[in-house]
Image (cartoon, helix red, strand yellow):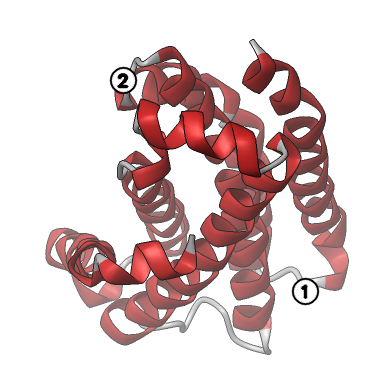
Amino acid sequence: MFRTEFRQGHALVGLLLFALASVYAAFQAVGDDAGAESWNALVWIVLIFTAFNAMARPHADDRPENRHYLTHVLRPVEWVLARTLYHWGLMTVLAALVFAAFALFLGTEHLGGGRWAWLLLGLELAGWALASCLTLLAAIAALAGAGFGLTAVMGLPLIMPIVLVATRFGADLMSGMTGAETVENLLFLGALAGAITAFGLVLFPYLWRD
């Protein structure tokens, strides 16, 4: 999967440019003196839209003829795990890029005392959770032949727990709380990411077989 994706280098560059352009648009909208609440809201909004954009890209193995071949050479768990790990790695890079761009354009004065490191960790865990959830939904949509529309329709309500926990964690850090004081939200994000990944590994073989 990695070799196939890197053959389409323009698509990966497009994702990076989309993330940077989104941050720059936020900077143009609020300037470099954004309040803590605006900074927190914008960083999660950009991450979510970047995740949807990353998962919306068609893969070569989504084509029926390729998928038919893969059913004979791969187990479904191997296929969905490989795609999840790829998207997780991709979201790790994109989350770090979004944070770096926000720090460059909008500053990090709301995240003194090392709280920026906690927020970066929260972005990475949220990226993992979003990657796991949207990867499973995109795979279901591909099997149904529905494309990205089904992923968006199913994904928006299903990612709400991730969004609520992530924004609460960011708001706590922006209000001056230390990472240790709001670590339960970070642990909940990690638990959500792990649970969604495990659910996908259990559920997808039944969908693949059908």
Residue type, numbered disc 1: Thr
- Taking the spot 12% from the left edge, 65% from the top edge, the residue there is 28
Viewport quadrant of the C terminus: top right
Position of residue 145 relative to residue 19, above or below, is above
Tell which circle, 1 or 2, labels the residue nearer the N-terminal end.
2
Q: Which residue is mark 1?
A: 178
Total marks shown come to: 2
Left or right of 8 on screen, residue 63: right
Q: Is residue 119 above or below residue 148?
A: below
Q: Secondary structure at mark 1?
A: loop
Q: Which residue is at the front of the view, 167 or 141?
A: 141
Image side of residue 25 versus residue 176, left or right: left
Give coordinates of residue 187: x percent, y percent: 85, 55
Residue sitting nearer the eye, 48 or 116: 48
Could you tell whether 63 is left or right of 9 in the image?
A: right
At x 77%, y 74%, the residue is 178
Q: Is residue 63 visible?
A: yes
Q: Nearer the viewer, mark 1 or mark 2?
A: 2
Q: Which residue is mark 2?
A: 149
Query: Looking at the picture, which amino acid does disc 2 mark?
Result: Gly
Query: Relative to the observer, which residue lies in front, 86 or 46?
Result: 86
- Between 126 and 24, the one nearer to me in the picture: 126
Give me the residue at 40% from left, 17% from top: 153
- Left or right: 49, with 173 as reference point: left
Marks 1/2: CA distance?
40 Å
Q: What element does badge 2 sit on?
A: helix
Quadrant housing residue 202: top right
**Picture coordinates of residue 118, whole percent (x, y):** 69, 75
Residue at 37% across, 63% down: 5
**Image position, residue 140 (x, y; %):** 53, 22
Q: Circles 1 and 2: CB distance less than 8 Å? A: no
